Amino acid sequence: MEKKCIGVDVGGTTAKIGLLSVKGQLLDKWEVPTGKAENGKHILPDIARSILDYLKGSGMSAEDLAGVGIGVPGPVMPDGGVEVCVNLGWENVNPAQELNRLLGGGVYVKAINDANVAALGEMWQGGGRGHKSLMLFTLGTGVGGGMVLDEKIVSGFRGMGGELGHIVVNFDEPLQCNCHNHGCLEQYASATGIVREARRALEASGQPSVLREQPDFSCKDVLDAAKGGDQLALKTVHHCMRYLGLAMHYVSHMTDPEIFVIGGGVSKAGQFLLDIIRQYYEGFTVMGSRRAAIGLATLGNDAGMYGAARLILDREAED
Amino acid sequence: MEKKCIGVDVGGTTAKIGLLSVKGQLLDKWEVPTGKAENGKHILPDIARSILDYLKGSGMSAEDLAGVGIGVPGPVMPDGGVEVCVNLGWENVNPAQELNRLLGGGVYVKAINDANVAALGEMWQGGGRGHKSLMLFTLGTGVGGGMVLDEKIVSGFRGMGGELGHIVVNFDEPLQCNCHNHGCLEQYASATGIVREARRALEASGQPSVLREQPDFSCKDVLDAAKGGDQLALKTVHHCMRYLGLAMHYVSHMTDPEIFVIGGGVSKAGQFLLDIIRQYYEGFTVMGSRRAAIGLATLGNDAGMYGAARLILDREAED
């Protein structure tokens, strides 16, 4: 029987687990609850038990696996170690070593940061399919970033590879970012950032806007209003996406990927959003013939699972 | 006899040619004039003739070479093609294919952008020795950049990899950069930029400065004055290096190299300059434990020759 891969995307409330063929077909998926309780010490044992139970129930064993890939919501060092993972309560955990042990010692396990793993997933089976180098921006509560060059994830020497959400793009920002810096990309290009910037615009002027009638408006409300022609909402979206275009300009001058893929909740605004992003990215990047394509992510919350499974195949190719 | 490598760093007035051992020892070096005349069509034949003459004179033949690497002063596409090279007058040239033919067809030749090649050279035998990932900034007339990740040059999909000199860092710059954009890093962190910023500072105030007594002052004069405690010169150097520190912050959040290496004429200011750069880089990069080392380039104008020769060894390793 052809071996299978397992991709695990570990999040703060659940871990998504997928069984995939080595060709990238998702054969089955399920979830396991996670939690920070007791410094997240139950997370890996729960995942291991779930995988072993699943294999048993399907008449498979650990030997039928090419390996297990894990996406971790925090920085992972080149040796696979996680110094601190706030989202899971982990401190000094090596999740790959630990999961390998919990699975009986015979299964190859590899762990990488979840945003980077999602980028690999989108390259393999998502919005970046057919390309070998890609930068994924995930615009959600925060801004995640993942970079793939020559089909390999760029994790960086200290696990900071692709962490574009925390580059400083505005020196005049009085509010502090979650990372304690001021003026990070995440403060504008995230769903949270778009809502805050819309509130600021409403407070700064008496300009009429449909948003004034919705005191608890969401990022989707801002994007819908912008699509509907609301000038204040449209200006807000332009203001926020200008910073994303700037970050993409930096990326093009640094690693020059074939394509940018935009994912996360904000990206549900679709082509309307891409057109605005493109306008700023191309405006900053004057070397006209040397701009990258821009596309939408297509795997949604499954991207990490796909990418985690894909991690295993690099090892297969090396063997 | 152990094979040798040849590294060629093609510049606008001369090509530097070096014979190196595969261990990175420079055994001999010489120069050949270059020029834009007739769209630079004599450049590669002159280099080929010089190499063949040298081999003959040393009792060697093309078969004694592991290969020839070339650094080209402009963007090189992944297939080795050069669409336009303003510095050499080239249009649609494939220098590796061409030089291979001129050397008789039996020698492996590889061409990469010169700034990227210099970065590889500094990693191999220079200021980045012992590291596997590095970003080189060459602060000269312009600002060149080269990035090496996992001992491989990042050329990019369109040859823009490491072109940090042309990222926009100041939106208020009225003057145009050579690339036609406004506010590029090169407009501040180059020798030319430092002189212009010093002139601006002199014009903007009546602040006393030793530079007022030197109407044709150079970048070295500004740096010397700053070292000597001249407040206007010191402020200028800080102003310019702040932008370099910002660019380094971006790089750390993108590819997270082990070390930054600073080269070019401006870097002759040594540790004094590095201390200022570090101050801004670390100020922007709040994730304290995840900052890169910063060092000086040590190979000077030979870096490209070393790096070009090193290109050959990757191929040797793949064989």
Image (cartoon, coloured by chain):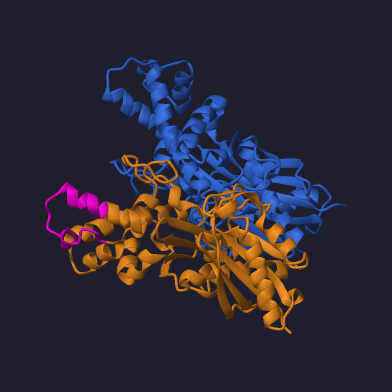
Chain colours: A orange, B blue
- Quarter occupied by residue A192: bottom left
Q: In the shown orientation, is residue A200 left or right of residue B312?
A: left
The residue lying at 23 percent from left, 52 percent from top is: A199
**Does the magenta-highlighted stretch encompass residue B208?**
no
Please provide percent x and percent y for residue A259.
47, 66
Comparing A253 with A288, the one in front is: A253
Vertical relation: B290 (above or below) B216: below
Q: Quadrant of the N terminus of chain A?
A: bottom right
Q: In the shown orientation, is residue B217 left or right of residue B308?
A: left
Magenta span of residues: A197-217
Vertical relation: B68 (above or below) B218: below
Please provide percent x and percent y for residue B247.
46, 43
- Quarter occupied by residue B237: top left
Q: Is residue A282 visible?
A: yes
Please provide percent x and percent y for residue A144.
46, 57
- Quarter occupied by residue A182: top left
Query: In the orientation shown, which residue stands out farthest toward the right?
Result: B1
The residue lying at 44 percent from left, 40 percent from top is: B246
